[in-house]
Image (cartoon, rainbow, N blue to C red):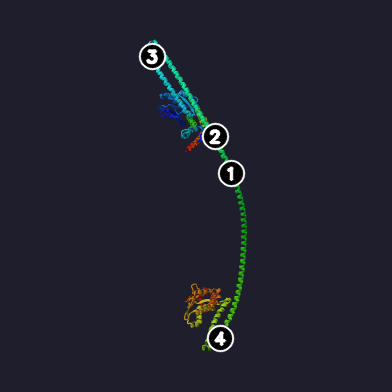
């Protein structure tokens, strides 16, 4: 929590506000760049995840799923996402264990959770830009 | 902050972009020179070409994983001693064992606590530098020792056994000294390492407590801020509620007032409606009363008119009866006068044929003349009276027009001669006989001629023109050369010829002549027309309808009869 912006107003509990607040203290424009990059990249990994799950998945697909989940987990954690890294971690583990049913079941929740994270981050972005202008 | 030349170079090999960004951000801020690579192979090439002071490698990389990268780097001379920190996932169970086997210097687990990253990196670099320094020192000592031992060994070969022994003893002493130095160096290194680690841990603890203090301060500030905001919000809510209540009250009072006004208005409207209804009722009553009155009035008017008409009719009838009686009396009286006049005329005629005439008794001649005129007037009056009394009955025969005109011309001859008037008679050869009352027709024509005679100037001409028209109607025109009539006078004459005006026109210039002529013409189904040009003369025309015309055959038959 900082005085020039409030992650408490993001709505929802998809994000841990302290993460974002620590980034707010960095060099000017860093938080905006970071959030923008995440908002650009995260849907790509989600799409990879989804396409591979819908495809079958084969053993190769499971590897792709594991990598995509890992990357999404890592980046989401970096942005302070609360539940999304956990879900991704479970998918990663399930993919490693070749537990396809579990992968499918978990993948269903990724979309909505990612959407919540994205909404919260968009609010952050909006606040940052407003404060900058 | 380190200067650009002395700044340690860090190579980051990580496929995840936010991770790269964050590492770069935090390390650059701490003064490091950061190079980035997205995958293992490329990262290894970069490591070989840039000789970094430290390499950060993510374990899970797409093609070549972090352990392999680590092993490869260790195999290359340039990076064999470069400190490598492996970034591992916290859930990976044997990451550290695998990492140590691959040659990793240190480990960081995800999610990375970036605020401490620079310290960690700094510590590893310093430790690596220290080890390098100590190893260099060790190498130097070992070299020196080797050189010394070698010299002593050469010397020993040339000296006797004692010397050799002494040399060996020296060597052993030197070796012991070297070992002691090495042991001391190791002990120093460990001590220094422990000191550095303790220092680092102390720094970390300090940083952590500072962060914790900041967090606590922020939390407190947040709580205070929240309380202030909540208090303000509560006050605002209270004020808003009061305003709302006020607005509600105002609304209620307006509504009440509005309702009262509505009620008043509705009552007024009701009263007005009732008044209007009453007015309408009154109007309709008045209208029906007016209609009744109108009807009564019209009935009364009709009754009055009928009564007046009846009265008029009976008055007219009475008047007609009286007129009839009067004209009957006038007729009888004029007949009696006529008989007496004729008796006088006969006496005068008898006398005139005697001596008195021979003596040229002008007085007698005057009496005779006046008496004849009186006779004519009286005869005319008698005819008119009989006509108006409805006593005239036509004695219709076939009348010879030419003969009648000749007869009349002869009758007025003396008068004409006296005034030097000439009479020209033209009879249409086709027209000889007409159907009519001979005596009355003669009166008619006589009257027309009398008028012409009366108005003609001395020495003038009177022309009589009898013609059969194409439609077999008959026109007998008597034209004089008198002064004629002005249009107004002509109009009066023609108006007088209307049957209804015949009595009132008795006093006109033409005397009885015109009414007599008209009434006789009417009895024959015809009429008399007057035309006149003022100063040029007047034409009086008897017009008889076609049924009055008789063909020549008729005349032949009549003649033969």
Q: Residues within 10 Å of mark 2 (few under 14, many from 20)?
A: few
Q: Are marks 3 and 2 in contact (CB under 8 Å)?
A: no
Q: Residues within 10 Å of mark 3 (few under 14, many from 20)?
A: some
Which residue shows up at 61% across the image and 69% down it? Answer: B308
**Marks 4 and 3, Cα distance to the nearest angstrom?**
237 Å
Q: Residues within 10 Å of mark 4 (few under 14, many from 20)?
A: few
**Sequence-wise, which precedes: disc 3 or disc 2?**
3
Q: Which residue is mark 2?
A: B224
Question: In the image, are marks 4 and 3 on the same chain?
Answer: yes
Please tell me the numbered disc located at residue B153.
Answer: 3
Q: Which residue is mark 1?
A: B246
**Marks 3 and 2, Cα distance to the nearest angstrom?**
82 Å
Which residue shows up at 39% across the image and 10% down it? Answer: B162
Q: Are marks 1 and 3 in contact (CB under 8 Å)?
A: no
Question: In the image, are marks 3 and 2 on the same chain?
Answer: yes
Instruction: Look at the numbered disc 2 and give the secondary structure of its residue.
Output: helix
**Marks 1 and 4, Cα distance to the nearest angstrom?**
142 Å
**Sequence-wise, which precedes: disc 1 or disc 4?**
1
Q: Residues within 10 Å of mark 1 (few under 14, many from 20)?
A: few
**Sequence-wise, which precedes: disc 4 or disc 2?**
2
Which residue shows up at 60% across the image and 77% down it? Answer: B326
The subunit carrying tag 4 is B
Return the residue nearer the eye: B27 or B191. B191
Instruction: Look at the numbered disc 3 and give the secondary structure of its residue.
Output: helix
Please tell me the numbered disc located at residue B473.
Answer: none
**Sequence-wise, which precedes: disc 4 or disc 3?**
3
**Marks 4 and 2, Cα distance to the nearest angstrom?**
171 Å
Q: Is residue B31 above or below residue B297?
A: above
């Amino acid at each position: 929590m900082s005085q020039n912006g409030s992650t408490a107003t993001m709505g929802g509990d998809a994000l841990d506000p302290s993460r974002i607040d620590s980034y707010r203290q960095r060099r000017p424009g860093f938080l905006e760049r970071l959030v923008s990059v995440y908002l650009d990249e995260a849907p790509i990994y989600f799409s990879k995840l989804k396409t591979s799950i819908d495809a079958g998945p084969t053993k190769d697909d499971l590897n792709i799923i594991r990598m995509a989940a890992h990357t999404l987990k890592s980046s989401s954690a970096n942005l302070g996402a609360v539940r999304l890294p956990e879900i991704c971690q479970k998918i990663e583990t399930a993919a490693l264990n070749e537990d396809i049913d579990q992968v499918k079941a978990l993948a269903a929740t990724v979309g909505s959770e990612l959407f919540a994270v994205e909404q919260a981050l968009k609010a952050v972005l909006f606040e940052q830009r407003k404060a900058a202008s | 902050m380190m200067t650009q030349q002395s700044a340690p170079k860090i190579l980051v090999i990580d496929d995840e972009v936010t991770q790269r960004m964050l590492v770069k951000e935090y390390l650059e801020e701490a003064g490091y020179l950061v190079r980035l690579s997205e995958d293992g192979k490329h990262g290894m090439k970069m490591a070989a070409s840039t000789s970094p002071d430290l390499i950060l490698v993510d374990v899970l990389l797409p093609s070549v994983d972090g352990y392999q990268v680590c092993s490869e780097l260790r195999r290359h001379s340039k990076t064999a001693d470069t400190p490598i920190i492996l970034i591992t996932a916290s859930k990976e169970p044997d990451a550290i064992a695998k990492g140590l086997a691959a040659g990793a210097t240190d480990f960081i687990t995800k999610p990375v606590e970036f605020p401490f990253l620079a310290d960690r990196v700094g510590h590893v670099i310093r430790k690596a530098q220290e080890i390098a320094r100590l190893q260099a020192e060790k190498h130097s000592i070992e070299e020196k020792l080797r050189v010394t031992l070698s010299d002593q060994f050469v010397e020993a070969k040339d000296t006797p056994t004692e010397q050799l022994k002494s040399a060996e003893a020296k060597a052993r002493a030197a070796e012991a000294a070297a070992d002691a130095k090495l042991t001391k160096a190791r002990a120093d290194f460990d001590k220094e390492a422990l000191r550095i680690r303790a220092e680092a841990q102390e720094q970390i603890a300090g940083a952590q407590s500072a962060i914790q203090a900041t967090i606590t301060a922020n939390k407190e500030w947040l709580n205070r801020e929240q309380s202030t905001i909540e208090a303000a919000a509560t006050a605002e809510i209270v004020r808003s509620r009061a305003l709302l209540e006020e607005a509600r009250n105002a609304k209620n009072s307006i509504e009440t007032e509005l309702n009262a006004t509505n009620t008043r208005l509705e009552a007024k409207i009701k009263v007005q409606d009732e008044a209007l209804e009453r007015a309408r009722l009154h109007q309709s009553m008045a209208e029906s009363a007016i209609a009744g009155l109108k009807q009564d009035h019209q009935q009364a008017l009709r009754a009055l008119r009928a009564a007046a008409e009846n009265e008029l009719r009976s008055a007219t009838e009475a008047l007609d009866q009286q007129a009839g009686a009067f004209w009957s009396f006038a007729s009888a009286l004029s007949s009696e006068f006529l008989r007496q006049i004729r008796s006088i005329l006969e006496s005068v005629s008898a006398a005139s044929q005697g001596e008195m005439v021979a003596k040229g008794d002008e007085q007698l001649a005057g009496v005779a003349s006046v008496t004849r005129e009186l006779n004519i007037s009286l005869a005319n009056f008698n005819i008119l009276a009989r006509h108006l009394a409805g006593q005239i009955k036509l004695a219709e025969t076939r009348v010879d027009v030419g003969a009648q005109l000749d007869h009349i011309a002869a009758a007025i001859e003396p008068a004409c001669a006296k005034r030097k008037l000439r009479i020209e008679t033209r009879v249409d050869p086709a027209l000889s006989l007409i159907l009519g009352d001979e005596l009355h027709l003669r009166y008619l024509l006589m009257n027309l001629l009398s008028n012409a005679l009366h108005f003609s100037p001395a020495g003038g001409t009177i022309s009589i023109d009898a013609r059969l028209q194409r439609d077999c109607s008959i026109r007998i025109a008597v034209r004089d050369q008198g002064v004629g009539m002005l249009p107004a006078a002509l109009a009066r004459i023609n108006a007088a010829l209307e049957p209804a005006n015949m009595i009132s026109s008795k006093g006109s210039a033409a005397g009885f002549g015109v009414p007599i002529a008209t009434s006789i013409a009417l009895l024959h189904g015809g009429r008399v027309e007057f035309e006149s040009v003022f100063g040029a003369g007047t034409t009086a025309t008897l017009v008889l309808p076609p049924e009055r015309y008789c063909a020549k055959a008729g005349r032949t038959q009549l003649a033969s009869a």
